[in-house]
Amino acid sequence: MFDADMKPFVLELNLARNKLTSLPDELGDLPNLRILQLDKNEFESIPACVSRLESLTYLGLHRNNLQDLPEQIGGLQNLKVLDLSANQLNALLMLSKVGCPW
């Protein structure tokens, strides 16, 4: 997906409106990715590779088919904005379940 030499330079990635249902695991190897836009796709769950994006400050998942949040999302300590609007989440109380500091 990305040349190894370019991975440190990827700061923002917009994959919105692509009817995606999954992401390559390699996406989790972008050490400086701060903004990830996955809005208006067809995700039923947050891809596991997202939990490895430690520099992430913005995660857009607006208008997908999400029903719950994985516990690993709580490990994104730099995350400031998590847009989960227009999904099929069972309850927002899950944020406390996953240990989110926000």
Image: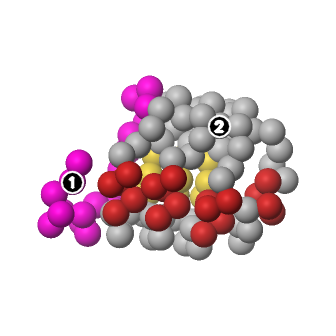
Name the spot of residue 63 as percent of width and height, x first: 60, 32
What scheme was used to colour the molecule?
A: secondary structure
Q: Which residues are magenta?
A: 1-20
The magenta stretch spans residue 9: yes
Q: CA distance from mark 1 to mark 2?
A: 27 Å
* Sequence order check, earlier mark of 1 and 2: 1
The residue sitting at 57% across, 67% down in the picture is 76
Asked if residue 28 lies left or right of residue 94, the reply is left
Q: Answer whether residue 17 is visible to the viewer in this image.
A: no
The residue sitting at 63% across, 31% down in the picture is 65
Q: Are marks 1 and 2 in contact (CB under 8 Å)?
A: no
The residue sitting at 40% across, 29% down in the picture is 18
Name the spot of residue 78 as percent of width and height, x first: 55, 72
The residue tagged 1 is 2
Q: Secondary structure at mark 1?
A: loop
Identify the mark at residue 66; answer none if there is no mark: 2
The residue sitting at 41% across, 43% down in the picture is 23
Q: Answer whether residue 87 is visible to the viewer in this image.
A: yes
